Amino acid sequence: MYYNDFVKVASITPKLEVGNPTYNMSEMLRVLKDLKASIAVFPELGVTSYTCNDLFFQNSLLQETEENIERLLKNNPFEGILAIGAPLEIDGILYNSAFIIKKDKIIGIVPKFYLPNTQEYYEKRWFTSGFDIVQKVKHIKYLGQTVPFGSIIFKTSDGKISFGVEICEDMWAPISPGNLLALNGAKIILNLSASNEYLNKRAIRRRTIIEHSRRNAGAYVYSSAGVNESTSETVFSGHNVIAQNGELLVETENFSQDSEVIYGDIDVSKIGYARKLNSSFRDTLNKFNLDCVNVEFELSKSDDYLFETPIDQTPFVPKKDELEAFEKIAALQENALIKRMKHIGAETIIVGVSGGLDSTLALLIASRVADQLNINRKKILGVTMPAFGTTKQTLNQARDLIDHLGVSIKEIDIRDHVNDHFDLIGHDRTTTDITYENTQARTRTNILMNLANMHNGIVLGTGDMSELALGWTTYNGDQMSMYGINAGIPKTLVRFMIEHYAEEKFGKNVESVIHSVLETPISPELIAEQKTEDTIGKYEVNDFILHRYLRFGDTESRIAWLLVKTFTLTEEEATAYVTNFFHRFYTQQFKRQATPDGPKILDVSLSPRSDHRMPSDVNKRKK
């Protein structure tokens, strides 16, 4: 399955019998008949089994191996790329090899380079390393076909998909063949393995595979031998792993007695984007040349794509080790503010408290920072500034939060002041236009800044990354502060943080207010009955778009397609979301250019000084 730069791969551990290629090939064919993938990987020496030992010297085993590979070529039900392991004889010498097959053609054979010969492994007794022979042999004859041999980069004609192959121990070498293949263009590394099991090895193996995918800025598909390989003192578990760009996609280790298949969805577009971004990867490209053979192949594209697991609707929000993630983010934000407070010698923290999500998080952080600096929380000034759109609910939430946290409160009704300003500029006071809204926002910021001067304090910004992305902020109003504590936190992550602050760090009274805040519709409350998501759409959807843009470099059409797959949206709704998001994103860069400092929390940010350097006047609108 291959569509829109997603390719489905399969890692397979078949049921087998040691030294019985006919049985083993029958099981492979049975599995292949129903396989729903475009690339499939079987274990090392899977045709014969890995633990044949001195049977590898027997001509009968080698002959039966060749007969059954021919049988596969004549009866292959699989339309995609297939990698199988088998012994290969060249001039009387055996090579532990991977056969890469497309229907009835062997499109390449790759020998194993590093042969383990310590502890339970004794591989050099039977096989020879491929290092020397690949220097002089680039093609071999096998079953009447002329087959590329050696270090091979397999690549589609359009260059979208490319892969290389390494075998088991190759992965464990200081500089693996897979590393060099990746530096020479392979986006995916396939590993045919027969890695045995013992206590703690699974964790080591998983970590190694994930790290290879990170260092290679690519994907890694690992297939290992199962329990049917187990013999004498050596036990195999069928630990199969698929990883991409330093992230585990799927793994299994079930000690299954039957054949087992796992599928993974590889995003080749993400690999290309990551390699463009990674300067260290780029710098390494021309320093380690590999004498490799290039083999072109074609992979049929599907009409659509079915993902193995539902796509995460809130990818910025931690799903594993949630408490640990919360503690780390809290430590980042709190210590960033501590550093800024110490550096400028601020004695107080000024927070505009609206009773909404962002100001709640900012005030919680300020309270924790005061505790860590041994500052009385009364030195924090929570300022409420009700105006024309303020509701009783949010005002009471702000008051209650300030009260329960034990910080100082200052309430300033700004309506008269705003009306005076309307009179000064000739506004009629009733037209609820952008001037009507922004005058209130700028008034609030002006008050906070002046209070900070009076109290030798710092104005703590409350705006988050989602608002910065959408330009949902008033220039020189709530866009401005002396430190943007939430600038690295998308809205969906703001929710996560205040939920955990409520549960982990503060008492029942604070927790009660926070739950009320979480249930309140998001609004800047600049006009009556104003709801942010009625205008810009759901933050979950906008954050998903931001995630795909910043982390994957996706096109607008690809993001719209993914929105349909991820949310209950029609194609028209998804296109509208993407169009609106990027219109706002590109036209509002000038606001981000003038944002104050704020701590980087995630692997991505919108800071114009570090992660996202975009001109203010870029024009991406379609003519």
Image (cartoon, grey):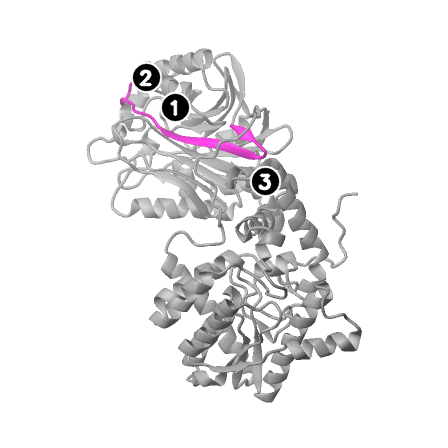
> Is residue 289 among what the camera can see?
no
Q: Return the mark for residue 43.
A: none
Nearest to the observer: residue 88 or residue 235: 235
Query: Residue at horizontal 39%, vertical 71%?
Result: 510
Kindly identify which residue carries mark 2. Answer: 61
Q: Position of residue 183 (x, y in %)?
A: 57, 42
Mark 3 or mark 1, earlier in chain: 1
- The residue type indicated by label 1 comes to Pro
| Closer to viewer: mark 3 or mark 1 | 3
Q: Is residue 128 left or right of residue 420?
A: left
Q: Quadrant of residue 138?
A: top right
Query: Residue at horizontal 42%, vertical 15%?
Result: 72
Asked which secondary structure carries label 2, the reply is helix
Query: How far separated are the C-alphas under marks 3 and 2?
Result: 43 Å
Query: Residue at horizontal 60%, vertical 60%?
Result: 530
Q: Position of residue 237 (x, y in %)?
A: 28, 36
- The residue type indicated by label 2 comes to Leu
Kindly identify which residue carries mark 3. Answer: 269
Residue segment shown in magenta: 1-21
Q: Quadrant of the C terminus?
A: top right
Kindly identify which residue carries mark 1. Answer: 87
| Closer to viewer: mark 3 or mark 2 | 3
Do residues under tags 2 and 1 come within 8 Å of each other at their CB atoms? yes
Crowd around label 3: few <14 · some 14–19 · many ≥20 (10 Å) = some
- The residue type indicated by label 3 comes to Ser
Q: Position of residue 571 (x, y in %)?
A: 60, 36
User: Up-down: is 78 above or below 557?
Assistant: above
